[in-house]
Amino acid sequence: MIRDKSGNKSNKPAKGVIAVASPSFRRERALIKRGIWPVAGCDEAGRGPLAGPVVAAAVVLDPKRIPKGIDDSKRLTAERREELFEEICATASFAVTFASPARIDRDNILRASLWALERAVNALPDMPQHVFVDGRDRLDTACDCEAVIGGDGLVVSIAAASIIAKVTRDRLMCALAQDCPGYGFESHKGYGVPEHLEALDRLGPTVHHRRLFAPVVAAREKHQPWTVKREPDLFVPEGPLATGISASV
């Protein structure tokens, strides 16, 4: 509900304002009517950062106790995410798993994320009969899995999982900031913002950084050159120029 220029309540969005619908329980309810239950939603947080793990969450909401206001975590303020996190934890069953920077470097970010999501589903107290996952990729689970592009803004179970994953990861990065002062993890949560890139260049990478992400490779080359493997470049004649750099783990 919004108000027009006169202060009167109106269901119509103001001119120039794009109305965004909240995620619904419609898809879950359709499955329940067919006798399919439990139904889980899962999502992850932290694919893009240069540091910290990917955090995956799977959530099975109680149809009779769905907290009001659940939405894509990116649309919520930090304060509202924290409030909903507590409400979801108190009313739903859920599981949280992590893919470490080492696994991300070994498997690549997509495979590590899918691995963590699959583990989260398998860690639920009761194995679901159907899973909704945000994105394009289905999970290799024992139950039916449905990938929903933009699912955190469409399916309320996925939105709930996005909140659990995001708040868990943010809290973790704030804790890591205590062990790694100077990087600003508590503010940017490991993303490649200018403040973080400057700290990387000045201080070098920590054990929590993803070693094969390009800005981290550059920092390793400057501060820890012995960790960057040099290999011959087959397209350059032998001599001083015949060296290439390979960022090995």
Image (tube, rainbow, N blue to C red):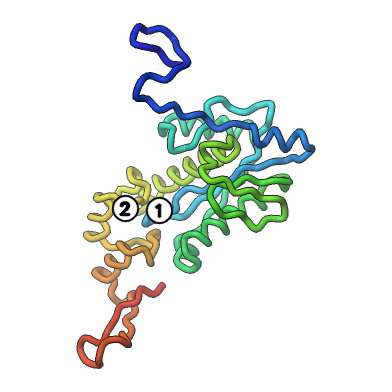
| Most foreground residue, 48 or 35 | 35
Q: Quadrant of residue 67?
A: top right
Against 172, residue 20 (above or below) is above
Task: Report if the CB atoms under discs 2 and 1 are less than 8 Å apart.
Answer: yes
Disc 1 crowd rating (10 Å Cα; few below 14, some 14-19, many 20+) is: few
Amino acid bearing label 1: Gly
Vertical position of residue 238 compared to residue 27: above or below = below
- Image x and y of residue 210, in percent: 39, 62
Secondary structure category for the residue under label 1: loop
Compute the Cα span from label 2 to label 1: 8 Å
Callout 2: SS:
loop
Q: Please rate how many residues cluster around mark 2, counting C-alpha atoms within 10 Å: few if below 14, some from 14 to 19, many from 20.
A: some
Q: Which mark is residue 192?
A: 2
Residue designated by label 1: 48
- Tell me where residue 217 appears, x and y as whole percent: 32, 67
- Picture residue at 32% right of the left edge, 64% below the top: 214
Q: Residue furthest bottom?
A: 238
Q: Quadrant of residue 208?
A: bottom left
**Residue at position x 50%, y 67% in the image:** 107
N-terminal-most mark, 2 or 1: 1
In the displayed image of the protein, which residue is found farthest to the right? 35
Quadrant location of the C terminus in the rendered image: bottom left
Residue 170, how many percent across, how many down? 43, 44
Residue 64: mark in rendering: none
* Left-right relation of 217 to 52: left
Q: Amino acid at mark 2?
A: Gly
The residue sitting at 34% across, 24% down in the picture is 16
How many numbered circles are shown?
2
Q: Is residue 5 above or below residue 233?
A: above
- Residue 101's image quarter? bottom left
